[in-house]
Image (spheres, helix red, strand yellow):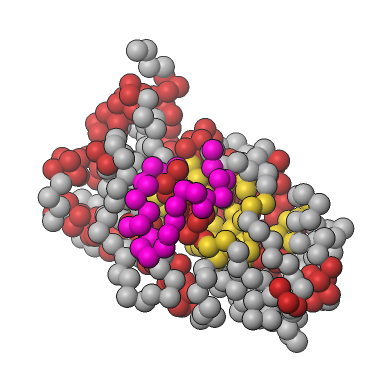
Amino acid sequence: MTITRRVFLRNSALAVVGTAAVPSFLARAAWGTALSGARTKRLVVMFQRGAADGLNIVVPHAEPQYYAMRPSINIPRKAVIDLDGFFGLHPSLAPFQPLWQQRQLAIVHAAGSPDPTRSHFDAQDFMEAGTPGLKATEDGWLNRSLHNLPPPAQAQRSPFQAIAMGPSIPRILSGLEPAIAMNNINDFSVGGRNPKPSPAATAFEAMYNHSLDTVLHGTGEETFDAVKMLKSADPSKYMPAPGADYPKARFGDSLRQLAQLIKANLGVQVAFADIGGWDHHVNEGSVDGQIANVLRDFSQSIAAFWTDLGDLGEDTVVVTMSEFGRTARENGNRGTDHGHANVMFVLGGPVKGGRVYGRWPGLEQSQLYEGRDLALTTDFRQVIGEAVARHMGNENLKDVFPGYENQPGKFLRLLG
């Protein structure tokens, strides 16, 4: 089989670092992938910390009660980016419109955790553990999703299989499967020459020192070389793909570096990033203001990430979630308080986008949860479960989401 230079560039660190010397395990991985036709499936989870206001993010602009309950913070119909005649996007989500039109972006409304808590801490913990209402769960569902991946994925595990973009391993990635946190590629030091290695690097090396996996032991030193190679190319000078315009903020920078790691063929299978700033009790704003600003950062960062991935997006699914939504009515401070159901975005090559999934419960008084919130009609584990099973190939969902009956028959069928 002839392997073209383009195929090799796509499947090796050369795509990131140009003519730098490529560690042998990366070259072997690229060569083996090209020969076998194997493609790494990736699941990227993005958490909107603080309880995002789903009703002002994906607006039910054909619902009269929406405007009646939000006289000062509603998104006027003339400003909404219409999707299907009933729902529309907040205007700050304009970068999502092409993704919707290209049918790469799907929306699940009235979704989230069924647990009634209105505590940020508990709700985030439940969603990251994947066991709403149960605090005793020790690990995170994204870590558990790696347990039973089908071959060849399990046979080709990389120490970079699970990446958290941040200073520490989040709840969602804690567990038996090795995972690393990377706040900044430049700060991620490996090898014995650095007198003060970063905590992430120390954990990374310990992964090998205590591992009984001979495959991991065999590639450990070469993986250290790979990180050194990325750093020697000066990651701060990384040039994203044309059109990938990342905002100059923490979330955009995290996704830029994540794209760089994915394009370096380091074997990333699952990844996590988060963005705060969604707890708008006071002066939430409408077309302008607090929610508009954070939505602009959110959508521009994700759109840039998607553009940067290029054809690697064919094998990537991105899912967004937040711990709970906001009250249907605005409060006396022109904001919203802690609510219940919310909205999720699902983006990816195999996504059957251009559609809002889930049953809309309505906003009439009798339809509200506890008389104040958007009611939940889709458990977030249905959405995630479909991505884990149909995209990643791990159909053992009873272990990923213990205690939850997550059968394929219940999937929303938003993945092809």
Residue 69 seen in this snapshot: yes
Q: Which residue lies furthest to the bottom in this view?
A: 332
User: Which is more toward the observer, 160 or 358?
Assistant: 358
Task: List the single residue furthest toward the right.
Answer: 78
Location of residue 47 in the rendering, given as x and y in whole percent from the top left corner:
51, 62
Question: Which residue lies at the image location 27% right of the left edge and 41% below the top edge?
Answer: 154
Q: Which of 210 and 399 is in front in this view?
A: 399
Residue 409 in the magenta stretch? The answer is yes
Judge whether 140 appears above or below 45 on screen: below
Residue 158 lies in quadrant: top left
Count of numbered labels shown in the rendering? 0
From the viewer's perspective, tell me whether residue 69 is left or right of residue 9.
right
Residue at (51, 53) in percent of width and height: 410
Could you say where residue 150 lies in the image, as x and y percent from the top left? 31, 40
Residue ranking furthest to the front: 409
Q: In which quarter of the image is the N terminus?
A: top left
Q: Can residue 99 be seen in this view?
A: no
User: Which residues, given as a range, are shown in magenta?
Assistant: 391-416
Percent x, y for residue 157?
27, 43
The residue drawn where x is 81% and y is 64% is 63
